[in-house]
Amino acid sequence: MREKITIVKVGGKIVEDEESLQHLLTDFSAIAGNKILVHGGGRSATKLAEKLGIESKMVNGRRITDAETLKVVTMVYAGLVNKNIVAKLQAKYVNALGLTGADMNIILSDKRPVKDIDYGFVGDVRFVNAEALIEILKQNVVPVMSSITHDGAGNLLNTNADTIAGEVAKSLSYDYDVTLIYCFEKKGVLKDENDDNSVIPKIDKELFKQYVEEGIINGGMIPKLENAFQALESGVRTVIITEASEICSGKGTYIIK
């Protein structure tokens, strides 16, 4: 029987609020066995960019990352947010290690090609070094991964944290029984965005397509669910989208084949 691993991806709204972050990390610390935390931090990056006089440009929820913006997101994601999480986990007796994709060559990405939009220094994941992650996990160390990767040629790239979580989960599914949890400020995928209790308990591809056509699922939830289905198809056992305070409860929306 394969060992279990839980990969939790947490959004920026949670990691940037002290109370919600403490609650999340308390719950994350209670998860037994192997685990990895993947985080964003976009709001903090936007605030710092504004203070530095750098305009933040977003297209379909994705940040346009020019050279100056790349400096900001690297400082925030890989620096302030990442090390704040690591320090708080150490205080909870979790031996955490903060990582970017460049560390130990863990995640290689390709700079997104210019089509209709030039996203700048944004990376699409090419390769996850599962062996390096496994070696870290064997030392009873918990990786805390920021959404910065690299191209292998000396360049850092801003990379979507949902995608990183999904790709890491897929790469580890050959060696572990993987549960992937996307957590944010809602109780799950909602049928009515104005009703926090309208959680859709299960979503398969057919229902996903239907809800997208009806406009029930829209915006940033679409790529999140696309990542979830790709993970399942690549061997990930369980994918859940849930509230940050429920990562240990089993509540939320289950994505199923």
Image (tube, rainbow, N blue to C red):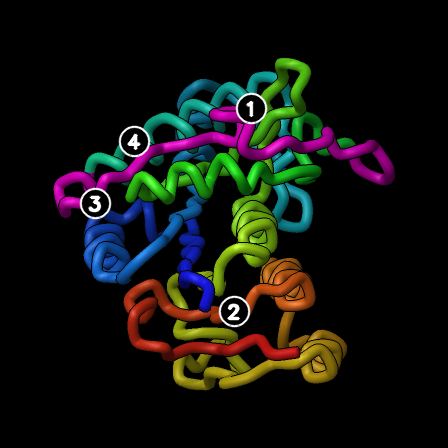
Residue 83 position in % (x across, y down): 29, 31
Task: Name which quarter of the figure residue 117 lies in.
Answer: top right
Instruction: Give the percent coordinates (x, y) of residue 220.
Output: 60, 58
Nearer to the camera, 57 or 28: 28
**Which of marks 3 and 2 precedes in the sequence?**
3
**Residue type of the residue flagged with mark 3:** Val
Of marks 2 and 4, which one's residue comes earlier in the chain? 4
Mark 3 to mark 1 CA distance (whole Å)? 32 Å
Query: Residue under circle 2?
Result: 239
Indicate the secondary structure of the residue bearing disc 1. helix
Q: Which mark is residue 95?
A: none
SS at badge 2: strand
Q: Residues within 10 Å of mark 4 (few under 14, many from 20)?
A: some
Split into 4 quadrants, where in the image is the C terminus?
Answer: bottom right
x 49%, y 85%: residue: 201
C-beta proximity under 8 Å, tags 4 and 3: no
Segment colored magenta: 88-117
- Mark number for residue 94? 3
Which amino acid lies under the numbered mark 2 shown in the image of this protein? Val
On whether residue 115 falls in the magenta region, the answer is yes
> Badge 1: how crowded within 10 Å, few (<14), some, or many (20+)?
many
Q: Is residue 58 magenta?
A: no
The amino acid at mark 1 is Thr
Q: Position of residue 209 (x, y in %)?
A: 74, 77
Instruction: Using the image, determine if residue 66 lies above or below residue 122.
Output: above
Seen from the viewer's position, the closer of residues 110 and 61 is 110
| Residue under pointer 1 | 69
User: At numbered mark 3, what does the secondary structure look like: helix, strand or loop?
Assistant: loop
